[in-house]
Amino acid sequence: MTGTIVGGNITPHFSRAEMACQCCGTYHAANMQKLCGWLESLRRDYGPLLVNSGHRCPLRNIQEGGAWNSQHLESLAADILVNRDSDRFKLVRLGIFHGACGVGIGRSIVHFDLRSTAINVMWTYPARG
Ligand SMILES: [Zn+2]
Ligand SMILES: [Zn+2]
């Protein structure tokens, strides 16, 4: 199911407003529930998480320069804002510990996704982040 932003939370600490597509408010409900459940477990170890990007519709994904098969399109990815080197290390370590399958490391964000491929991947963002 996809829907529009009507406020409220998906899980106790993650709202529709921050997780839905920033241009149209859509997301995949079942995948988003899974993603936010995962983020809750990460949050318990790490502390509060600031989500910069959750679900993206195809148009938004192009505007953001996302990969054609970006997990953001499936509501299975979140970009977390992080600036300090020590916080980035802690976040990446805990994300992998909690089972992230894709990890992208930028200067100001860490991308986590729950892709269902056999091979886990990690990449860096050259200029932006
Ligand atoms: Zn959109
Ligand atoms: Zn991302």
Image: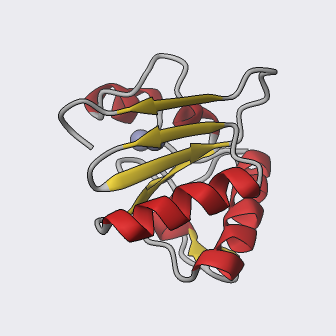
15 or 86, nearer to the observer:
86
Q: Which residue corresponds to the image point at 75% horizontal and 71% vertical from the top-left? A: 41
124 or 89, nearer to the observer:
89
Q: Which residue corresponds to the image point at 60% horizontal and 47% vertical from the top-left? A: 27
Here the colouring is: secondary structure
Image location (x, y in percent) of residue 126? 24, 30
Image location (x, y in percent) of residue 37? 77, 65
Which quarter of the rendered picture does the C terminus lie within? top left
Image location (x, y in percent) of residue 103? 55, 40
Task: Examine the rendered structure and indicate whether residue 46 appears above or below residue 128.
Answer: below
Lateral position of residue 118 relative to residue 17, left or right: right
Lateral position of residue 75 relative to residue 56, left or right: right
Task: Examine the rendered structure and indicate whether residue 60 appears above or below residue 82.
Answer: above
Task: Examine the rendered structure and indicate whether residue 2 appears above or below residue 108.
Answer: above
Q: Is residue 18 visible?
A: yes
> Picture quarter containing residue 75?
top right
Q: Which residue corresponds to the image point at 71% horizontal and 41% vertical from the top-left? A: 114
26 or 14, nearer to the observer:
14
Task: Examine the rendered structure and indicate whether residue 39 appears above or below residue 13.
Answer: above
Lateral position of residue 27 relative to residue 87, left or right: right
Which quarter of the rendered picture does the N terminus lie within? top right
Q: Is residue 51 visible?
A: no
Q: Which residue corresponds to the image point at 31% horizontal and 33% vertical from the top-left? A: 125
